[in-house]
Image: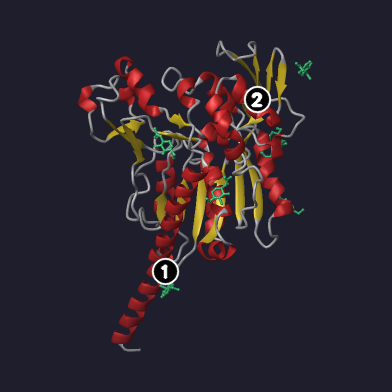
Amino acid sequence: MTRLSLFLLMIAFVFVYKISSIDCKSPIIFIPGSFCSLLEVRIDTALQPACSASLHNQWVLLWLNLRFFEPSNLACLHNIFKFVYNSSSNSFENPLGVETRIVPNSIYGSFLTGILWEYFELDKFLFHFVTKYDYQDGVNLHSIPYDFRRGSNATLLSFNENLKQLIELTYVRNMNTSVYLVSHSTGGSMSLFFLSQQTQIWKDQYIQGWISLSGNIAGEIDNIQNLVQGFLSPFVPRDVIQTWDFFAWRLPEPMIYGSQRTIITSPSKNYTSYDMLNFLHDVNAKELAFIYPEVSSILGYLPAPNVDTYCFFGANVSTPIGYISKSDEFKNNHLETIYGWGDGEQDDTTNMSCKLWNKTMDFKYKLILKGFNGVKHTKLVGNDNVLEEIDKIISF
Ligand SMILES: *[C@@H]1O[C@H](CO)[C@@H](O)[C@H](O)[C@H]1NC(C)=O
Ligand SMILES: *[C@@H]1O[C@H](CO)[C@@H](O)[C@H](O)[C@H]1NC(C)=O
Ligand SMILES: *[C@@H]1O[C@H](CO)[C@@H](O)[C@H](O)[C@H]1NC(C)=O
Ligand SMILES: *[C@@H]1O[C@H](CO)[C@@H](O)[C@H](O)[C@H]1NC(C)=O
Ligand SMILES: *[C@@H]1O[C@H](CO)[C@@H](O)[C@H](O)[C@H]1NC(C)=O
Ligand SMILES: *[C@@H]1O[C@H](CO)[C@@H](O)[C@H](O)[C@H]1NC(C)=O
Ligand SMILES: *[C@@H]1O[C@H](CO)[C@@H](O)[C@H](O)[C@H]1NC(C)=O
C-alpha cells in the first residue's frame, strides 16, 4: 500500500466515522411540560391602565418574569395573563390591548431557547446528549415551546403545524433520519394529540419513537386544585386560571378515572371524572364549562400513538389523589388533600392510559411502561436512571 492510498484510507475512515457518529443518529425533539415555555406580551397601556406606562407597546417577557410578581405590578399581571371569553365564537382570546406570543425557536435555535429550563434540569438533559453522544445543539437536538394556557382544538392544531414543520426540517437536515419525540408532563398530551392527527405513512417515515416522561395523558387530578386555589396564588389566582382552556382540556379523563372513584367531595356531592362539567359549574368556572364538552373530547378517546412508545413515570412519591371541600361552592378556596401514590403531582392511575394501548395499538409498535422509584415529577427529565434508559433506546 502506498503512503498516498493509506492517507486516503484514513481520510475515508475519518469521514465515515464522522458521518455515522454525528449525522446519522436519530435527532431528539423535546416537548416540555406546562409552565415550562416562555411567553412574551405586548401591552397597549392606554387599554390596560393597571400596567405601567413604561411597558407600552414593546415585547417583554410575561412568563416567567419576576418583575410582574412585585405588588405594584400584580393587578397588571392578572389583567394580561387571563383570557376573555367570546360567546359568539365560544372561545377564549387575549383581552383588549394585549398580544402574547411564545419566544420563537428557529430550526437553528438552541435547545434552551424559549423554554424555562432552570426548574426542570433541562440543561442537564442537553449536556448529557451533547457530551455523551456528540449531539449538536440546534442541529439534532431541539425543543418546541407552546402557550401552556391553551387547550382548544384551534390552538392545538396550530401547535401541530409548528411541530410538524420542525420535525420535517430536522429530518432533512439530518440526512433523512427519523426523530425521537421526548415529552415531559403536558408535553405528553401535546405529543399524543399531534400523533393522533398524522397519517400512519407520515409517522412511519418521520417518527422513530416517542418517549413520554410523566405524560399527563389521562388528565391530572391536581388541575382541580389549580381551579379552586389558583397557581402560586396570589401570583396566578383562580380568576386567571379559570380563563385558560387548558384547564377544561386536561381534567381527569372518564375513560381512565371511571365512574366509581370519587375525586372531589363537597358537603352535598361526590364528584367522579364523569362529573367534571358539574364541578366547573360549581367552582364558578362557567366559561370553561361552556367549552368543556368540546375540548374534553379532543383526547378523551385516548387514541393509540401507533409509533414505538415508551411511558416512563416517577413512582412511590406521596401524591394528591383527591380533595375534600367544606363548601359546596368551593368559596373559601380551602381544600383538604387526600394523598396516595404517584410522582408527587400525577397519581399512578395516569399510567393506565399507556396500558390501554396494549389493546388498541398496532402490535408492530413497541410499548414499554416503566416506573422510577422515588423520582419526583419535576426531576424525571434530569434523572440519571431515566437518562440511562433513554440512552438504551436511542442507541438501539
Ligand atoms: C368574537 O368572535 C367573533 C366571531 O369569531 C368575532 O367576529 C368578534 O370580533 C369577536 N369579538 C371580540 C371582542 O373579539
Ligand atoms: C432525502 O429524501 C429526499 C426526498 O425523498 C431526497 O430527495 C434526498 O436526496 C434525501 N437526502 C438524503 C441525504 O438521503
Ligand atoms: C360520598 O361518598 C361517601 C363515601 O362513599 C359517602 O359516605 C357519602 O354519603 C357520599 N356523599 C354524598 C353526598 O353522596
Ligand atoms: C377540531 O378541528 C378539526 C379541523 O377543523 C375537526 O375536524 C375536528 O372535528 C375538531 N375536533 C373537535 C373535538 O372539535
Ligand atoms: C403489553 O402486553 C404484553 C404481553 O401481554 C406484556 O408483556 C407487556 O408488559 C404489556 N405492556 C404494558 C405496557 O402493559
Ligand atoms: C414502589 O414501592 C413498592 C413497595 O416498596 C415496590 O414493590 C415497587 O416496585 C415500587 N415501584 C417502583 C416503580 O419502583
Ligand atoms: C401504574 O398504576 C398502578 C395503579 O393504578 C400502580 O399499581 C402501578 O404501580 C403503576 N405502575 C407504574 C410503573 O408506575
| Location of residue 337 with respect to 149 vertically, above or below | above
Q: Residue furthest left?
A: 54
Using a 10 Å C-alpha cutoff, classify the residue at mark 2 as few (fewer than 14 neighbours), some (14 to 19) or many (20 or more).
some
Quadrant of the image for the N terminus?
bottom left
Q: Which mark is residue 222?
A: none
Q: Residue furthest bottom?
A: 1
Q: Which residue is more in the foreground, 95 or 174?
A: 95
Give the amino acid at mark 1. Met
| Location of residue 200 with respect to 63 vertically, above or below | below
Q: Residue furthest front?
A: 88
Q: Residue at x 45, y 24 (%)?
A: 240
Q: Is residue 352 left or right of residue 146?
A: right
Tag 2's secondary structure? helix
Label 1 belongs to which residue?
A: 175
Q: Position of residue 365 (x, y in %)?
A: 65, 60
Q: Which residue is more in the foreground, 6 or 45?
A: 45
Q: Residue at x 50, y 63 (%)?
A: 206
Q: Is residue 183 left or right of residue 172?
A: right
Sequence-wise, which precedes: disc 1 or disc 2?
1
Q: Is mark 1 within 8 Å of ligand 2?
A: yes
Count every numbered label the image shows and give the total: 2
Label 2 belongs to which residue?
A: 278
The reply to whether residue 216 is in sight is no
Q: Position of residue 374 (x, y in %)?
A: 60, 33
